[in-house]
Amino acid sequence: DAFAHCVESTEKPVVRKQTLLHALDWVVYQMDSHEGTLHVELFSLLTRMVMAGVSDVWSAIRRMCARRLGSVLPFLSLDQLQCLFEALVKTCLQETSSWQQKEGASM
């Protein structure tokens, strides 16, 4: 939760980018060492961070998050993949989403 709070509460793009980078790497490390899929709480946290990252106002953060997401996807169950995909599609379809959010979600 500290990772997500840091990403969602700071206005410093470097802090957001580094926090997302380390958090996504940490998820991959955890899953590599435990050889399993993400449990519900960790998946919820991952979803919050990914959605914050791909929706960020800074394009470098959106791109980095979209690239790093590829290393996490193999550890998601089919239901988790579908849930994440639906959240990204919902962002693209919402009229209230900014162009940055739509661009990030479509990456």
Image (cartoon, rainbow, N blue to C red):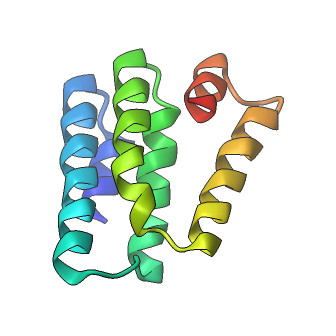
Residue at the spot x=48%, y=81% of the render? 40
Q: Is residue 20 left or right of residue 44?
A: left
**Percent of width and height locating residue 32:** 21, 71
**29 and 43: which is toward the camera:** 29
Residue at the spot x=65%, y=64% of the render? 83
Residue at the spot x=16%, y=76% of the render? 33
**Percent of width and height locating residue 48:** 47, 55
Q: Is residue 4 left or right of residue 82?
A: left
Q: How many marks?
A: 0
Q: Is residue 101 above or below residue 7?
A: above
**15 and 9: which is toward the camera:** 15
In what quadrant of the picture does the C terminus appear?
Answer: top right
In what quadrant of the picture does the N terminus appear?
Answer: bottom left
Residue at the spot x=38%, y=35% of the render? 67
**33 and 99: which is toward the camera:** 33
- The image quadrant that residue 5 belongs to is bottom left
Q: Is residue 52 left or right of residue 5?
A: right
**Percent of width and height locating residue 11:** 31, 28
